[in-house]
Image: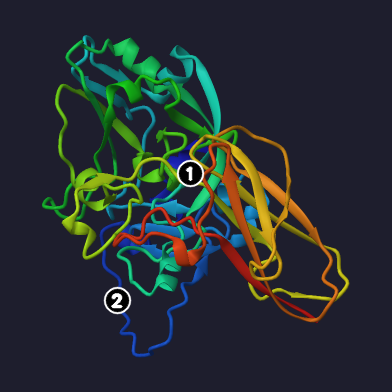
C-alpha cells in the first residue's frame, strides 16, 4: 500500500464498517436464535480474512494456526481499538508527536524527524491484549466482562523506532518529573467518555527498552495497528501500547484515568484474583507485565489425523521477558508429560517456537495439552487452578486441543 492510500486508508477502502467508522450507524439486526454467535471472517484493507468481533471500534482476531510462526505477518496481526472515532485521514506533512509538560524544551516531531534525528532501534516483542483468551474463563463457571477473545488477540513482530528515553532526553526532563502520560488520536463518541490515556513512572519511561515505533516487520505500521506511530512496551500487555501516538506528557503528579485505575485492573493481591466475594471490594492495580504462556498452533481443534501419521505438533511460548526454560506437552489429557524441542530464540520478549513429533498408534479421540515454564520458575496453571477476576484479564492456563485419530 502506497503512503497516500495508507494515509487515506479508511476513506479509501474500508468496506465492512465504513459507515460506522465514518460516524454513521448501520441497521441493527435483532438476534432471535439462542445458539452461540459465530463472528464473521472478513478481510479488512491490509489484512487477510480475520474474525471480526466488532467493526466499531475494529476488533479483529488472528486464527489459531498463525501460532506455528515465530513472527506474525502484518496482514494476520490482530486488531484492538477502544474508541469508535478513529481518524480517516492522516497527512504525514501535518502530523506531529507533541512532547510537553515538565520538560525544558517542548518538542513537535514529525515522523521524518524521528527517522532522521534519532538513533533507530529494533526489538522483537509479543503484543498481547490484556483480555486475550478471556472466553476460556467460562470453564471456571464464572462469567467475565469484556470481549470474549479466543487466543487470537496476540502476535509477535519486529518493531523499529526510537527509544522513548532518547525523545525525553532531547526534551530535557525536569527534576520534578515523576510520571509520563501518553495519548493517541482515537477519540470517544461522546465527550463524557474518558480518553484512552496511559501513564508510567518516569524511571520506566527512561529505561531504554520502550520505543516509539514507526515500523512493523520491515514496513510502515499498518493503519489498523496504529499508523503512523505506536508505543512499544516489551513484556507488558498491549493496553499500554498506545496506537496513533500523538502526545507524550511529562508530569509532576499522577493523573488518575479510567483505563489505568478502573478498567484494566485486577485485585492487588498475590494471585491477582478474586479470593472471595467481588474483586471490586479489593484494592485494585493496573495490569502490567504478561504471564508465562504457551499456545498450540497445530493441530487445531477437531483436526482428523490418520493413524500412524507422523504429526509435528507446533506452537509458541512467551512470558514477560524472563525467557522460556521449557515447554511440556501431553497427548493423553494430562496423564503424562514430555519435553518439546525449543526452536530459535528471537529474544527475551519474543515468541519461543516449540515442536513435538507425535506418532499416534491407536484410533480414538485425544486431548493434546501444553504448558510453559520460564527461567524464574513460573509455570502455566491448569484451567481448574487459574485465579478468576471479573475483567477476565491475564488468562494463561494450560492450552489444549482435541483431535481425532482415524
Q: Is residue 72 visible?
A: no
Mark identifier at residue 127: 1
Image depth: mark 1 or mark 2 in front:
1
Name the one closer to the observer, 327 or 182: 327
Q: Percent from the top left, x then y, of residue 52?
A: 45, 65
Callout 1–callout 2 Cβ contact below 8 Å: no
Q: Residue furthest left?
A: 192
Mark identifier at residue 269: none
- In the rendered view, tell whether residue 139 sits above or below residue 84: below
Image quadrant where one finds the N terminus: top right
Looking at the image, what colour scheme do you see?
rainbow
Q: Is residue 17 shown left or right of residue 324? A: left
Q: Which residue is mark 2?
A: 27
Q: Residue furthest right?
A: 308
Q: Percent from the top left, x then y, of residue 205?
A: 34, 24
Tag 2, which secondary structure? loop
Amino acid at each position: 500500500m502506497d503512503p497516500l492510500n495508507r494515509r487515506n486508508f479508511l476513506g479509501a477502502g474500508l468496506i465492512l464498517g465504513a459507515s460506522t467508522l465514518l460516524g454513521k450507524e448501520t441497521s441493527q439486526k435483532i438476534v432471535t436464535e439462542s445458539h452461540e454467535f459465530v463472528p464473521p471472517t472478513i478481510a479488512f484493507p491490509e489484512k487477510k480474512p480475520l474474525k471480526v468481533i466488532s467493526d466499531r471500534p475494529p476488533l479483529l482476531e488472528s486464527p489459531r494456526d498463525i501460532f506455528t510462526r515465530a513472527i506474525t505477518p502484518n496482514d494476520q496481526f490482530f486488531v484492538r481499538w477502544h474508541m469508535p472515532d478513529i481518524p480517516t485521514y492522516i497527512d504525514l506533512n501535518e502530523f506531529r508527536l507533541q512532547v510537553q509538560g515538565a520538560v525544558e524544551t517542548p518538542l513537535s516531531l514529525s515522523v521524518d524527524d524521528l527517522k532522521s534525528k534519532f538513533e533507530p532501534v529494533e526489538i522483537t516483542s509479543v503484543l498481547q491484549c490484556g483480555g486475550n483468551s478471556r472466553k476460556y474463563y467460562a470453564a471456571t463457571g464464572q462469567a467475565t466482562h469484556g470481549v470474549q477473545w479466543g487466543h487470537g488477540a496476540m502476535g509477535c513482530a519486529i518493531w523499529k523506532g526510537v527509544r522513548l528515553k532518547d525523545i525525553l532526553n532531547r526534551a530535557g526532563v525536569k527534576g520534578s518529573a515523576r510520571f509520563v502520560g501518553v495519548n493517541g488520536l482515537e477519540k470517544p463518541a461522546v465527550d463524557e467518555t474518558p480518553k484512552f490515556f496511559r501513564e508510567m513512572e518516569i524511571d520506566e519511561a527512561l529505561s531504554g527498552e520502550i520505543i516509539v515505533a514507526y515500523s512493523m516487520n520491515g514496513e510502515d505500521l499498518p493503519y489498523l495497528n496504529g499508523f503512523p506511530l505506536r508505543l512499544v512496551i516489551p513484556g507488558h500487555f498491549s493496553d499500554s501500547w498506545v496506537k496513533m501516538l500523538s502526545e507524550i506528557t511529562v508530569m509532576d503528579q499522577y493523573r488518575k484515568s479510567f483505563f489505568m485505575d478502573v478498567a484494566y485492573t485486577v485485585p492487588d493481591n498475590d494471585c491477582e484474583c478474586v479470593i472471595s466475594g467481588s474483586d471490586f471490594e479489593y484494592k485494585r492495580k493496573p495490569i502490567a507485565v504478561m504471564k508465562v504462556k504457551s499456545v498450540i498452533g497445530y493441530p487445531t481443534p477437531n483436526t482428523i489425523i490418520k493413524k500412524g501419521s507422523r504429526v509435528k505438533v507446533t506452537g509458541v511460548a512467551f512470558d514477560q521477558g524472563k525467557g522460556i526454560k521449557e515447554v511440556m506437552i501431553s497427548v493423553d489429557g494430562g496423564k503424562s508429560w514430555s519435553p518439546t524441542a525449543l526452536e530459535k530464540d528471537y529474544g527475551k520478549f519474543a515468541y519461543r517456537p516449540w515442536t513435538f513429533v507425535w506418532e499416534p498408534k491407536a484410533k480414538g479421540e485425544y486431548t493434546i495439552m501444553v504448558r510453559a515454564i520460564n527461567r524464574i520458575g513460573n509455570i502455566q496453571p491448569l484451567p481448574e487452578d487459574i485465579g478468576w477476576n471479573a475483567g477476565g484479564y491475564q488468562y494463561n492456563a494450560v492450552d489444549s486441543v482435541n483431535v481425532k485419530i482415524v
